[in-house]
Image (cartoon, grey):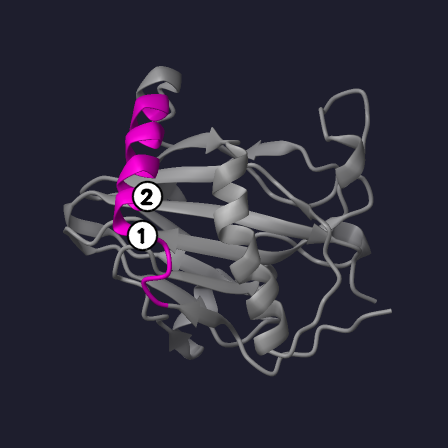
């Protein structure tokens, strides 16, 4: 059995993914966002309960997203998830990964405070007739979240994490300490617990591109 003990809130890696590979990912992602027309307030997985997709509330998120499933992308990123899990002292069990989400934030784009998964038994993925949760996700929760920065020719769009893992009221967020991982340069990434509140501040100039994905494992006690 595991407990949610945090020795570090997150773990950073700087400039570890080659710039040319970042550009390749942007090329793939931008073509898919146009193809799927995933603009504005799109559906996003909550990582909780049935694992179903729920509409974001207006004002919660503004971005374009698509899903990337190329195996080489996971082969490139997942070793850093393993390393962060060890170096940060979490050492949490995880054995599955969701599809990678490519996200494009244009001027005015943002993602307000949210968490990726509840990480306890109430947040487990469950299969039922109404959703298409893969069998190997059943009984798992989002434990480890990853954000990979793909470009730096934009302004604003800071990625921020709240220091209080048990905070659950958005109206009180300004009383909490906000941490800003140093991942602005392309090819830099941060790994952090999925239950921590985090956000992407509004982009004020240019376009911000990123990859996010989630490592799944058994729930905490």
Lateral position of residue 81 relative to residue 25, left or right: right
Residue at which label 2 appears: 21
- The furthest residue to the bottom: 7
Check contact, mark 1 vs mark 2: CB within 8 A: yes
Q: Residue 103: x and y, percent?
A: 37, 39
Q: Nearer the viewer, residue 54 or 7?
A: 7
Magenta stretch: give its range. 14-33
- Residue 27: image quadrant is top left
User: Going 37% across and 70% down the picture, which residue do you hit?
Assistant: 181
In the rendered image, which quarter contains the N terminus? Answer: bottom right
Magenta residue check for 69: no
The mark total stands at: 2
The residue labelled by disc 1 is 18
- What residue do we see at 72% from left, 56% from top? 94
* Camera-side residue of 113 and 169: 113
Q: Which of the 4 image quadrants contains residue 60?
A: top left
* Whether residue 83 is visible: yes
Q: Is residue 114 visible?
A: no
């Amino acid at each position: 059995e595991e407990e949610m003990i945090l020795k570090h809130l997150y773990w950073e890696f700087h400039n570890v993914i080659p710039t040319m590979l970042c550009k390749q990912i942007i090329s793939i992602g931008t073509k898919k966002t146009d193809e799927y027309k995933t603009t504005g307030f799109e559906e996003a997985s909550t990582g909780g309960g049935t694992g179903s997709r729920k509409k974001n509330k207006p004002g919660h998120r503004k971005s374009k997203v698509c899903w990337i499933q190329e195996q080489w992308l996971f082969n490139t990123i997942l070793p850093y998830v393993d390393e962060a899990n060890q170096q940060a002292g979490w050492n949490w069990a995880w054995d599955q990964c969701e599809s990678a989400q490519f996200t494009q934030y244009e001027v005015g784009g943002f993602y307000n405070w949210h968490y990726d998964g509840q990480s306890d038994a109430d947040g487990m993925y469950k299969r039922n007739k109404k959703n298409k949760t893969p069998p190997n996700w059943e009984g798992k929760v989002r434990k480890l979240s990853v954000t990979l920065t793909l470009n730096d020719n934009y302004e604003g769009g800071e990625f921020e994490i709240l220091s209080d893992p048990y905070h659950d009221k958005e109206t009180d967020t300004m009383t909490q300490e906000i941490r800003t991982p140093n991942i602005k340069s392309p090819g830099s990434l941060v790994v952090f617990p999925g239950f921590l509140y985090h956000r992407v501040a509004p982009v004020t100039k240019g376009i911000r591109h990123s990859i996010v994905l989630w490592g799944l494992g058994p729930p905490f006690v």
